[in-house]
Image (cartoon, helix red, strand yellow):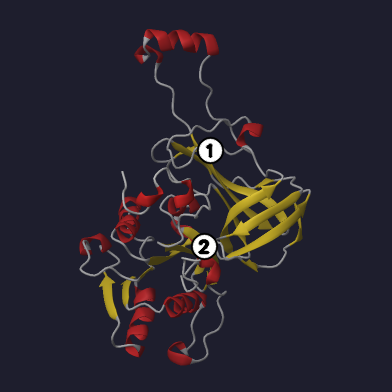
Amino acid sequence: MTDQICNQSLSFDGNAHNLLASQPGLFSPWDYGIEPEAVESSNWSGYQAFYTIENGQLLLECLVVGYIMPKPAITQPDHLAELDRLIGPKQPLPALNNVEPEKMSGCYWQYNNVNLALDYTGTLTIGDDHVRRELTFKEGKLLDTGIEKARALNPEVSGDAFTPEDLPSPQPCTTGMFASALDAADEVLAQIIGSCNPNTVLSCGPTTETICRRWQDSKPEVQLTVLDSATPNAAFPLSVVPDLALVSDTLERVSRDEGVLLLGQLRNYGSHQIAVLVSDSAGWMLTDFTSLGFRRHTQLQTANGPYTLYTYNLDSYNHKRSWNNPDHWANPEMWGKAWW
């Protein structure tokens, strides 16, 4: 059985969290005349929903649905044409809150900036395998944020693993090697590299290179790889797999295809953790990153305008399921030894 992705996430306090449970159910595309299709085995629901909270109001921010365009009637086999006649033509995807769907790669369509206010009353559980929080709503308004509860759900996952939820919000850096006037972007990047404590680091972009070189100055044993932000993909394949890859000032200047290739290669060549800082004016969407396993970590206000930080962690990008263990395996003695 293919492991299922977590198909719903909620942005809360500037961080993106997996939506683990909702009592009662939160949102159904079918209620709005949208019928998602399961176009890949890792997401049988056929859709991904991204929520946010603004001024205490719960909103559906973005919806991605699977939808296969109908083939022209002339190419349909006779028996399918008869079936179409009986059930009627396949309907196009409707608008959602006056937002029309846009074609993505493959068979996915995206409703972006929907900002649909949800009249939800109930409890949402957000978090990961380490920490969970319950949020209580009444008629779409946030009533109670609960408290974070540490959960020993997955003992084999190290508590030292770098995950977006583990990182603190940006704070002024007044001591140590970063004791200088840093803006919000510099501060959060410094905190990430300090929390990760990497021995091998990759930098792409002037902002991250400055931070990485200061890290290397403080720890001479650190091995630093620097990519040219104008032609970052020319450096692949890498001679060393980085513990941490930091990217800035890059996606704003390269083409969309080059940017996607860079992120995909950093991930596929085994980078353990990746942090990407991109200007909100660059045109990159949340779903551009979530489709590659990234999470939106936080949004920053800098001297050059608003930026968003996206993070990826090889240990936690795919939400772990309690049922996915040898106890539910047809041949438990082969667990972790054989794949197909």
Mark positioned earlier in the residue sequence (2 or 1): 1
**Which residue is depicted at the point 68% across and 53% down?**
124
**Which residue is depicted at the point 72% across and 54% down?**
57
- Up-down: is 91 above or below 88? below
**Amino acid type assigned to the residue bearing label 1 in the image:** Ser
Total numbered labels placed on residues in the image: 2
Mark in the foreground, 2 or 1: 2
**Image disc number at residue 154:** 2
**Amino acid type assigned to the residue bearing label 2 in the image:** Asn
330 and 18: which is toward the camera: 330
Mark 2 residue crowding within 10 angstroms, few (<14) / some (14–19) / many (20+): few
**Which residue is depicted at the point 39% across and 37% down?**
106
- Up-down: is 302 above or below 322? below
**Image disc number at residue 11:** none
Distance from Cα at disc 2 to Cα at disc 1: 25 Å
Left or right of 303 in this view: 236:
left
86 and 330: which is toward the camera: 330
162 and 209: which is toward the camera: 162
- Could you say whether the residue bearing mark 2 is in a helix, strand or loop? loop
Left or right of 265 in this view: 60:
right
| Residue labelled with disc 1 | 45
Query: In the rendering, at what x and y percent does residue 188 appear?
Result: 49, 75
The quarter of the displayed image where residue 34 is located: top right
- Up-down: is 11 above or below 93? below
Query: In the rendering, at what x and y percent does residue 310 appear?
Result: 47, 62
The quarter of the displayed image where residue 267 is located: bottom left
Left or right of 180 in this view: 223:
left
Query: In the rendering, at what x and y percent does residue 8 appear?
Result: 57, 49
- Up-down: is 94 above or below 227? above
The quadrant in which the C terminus is found is top left
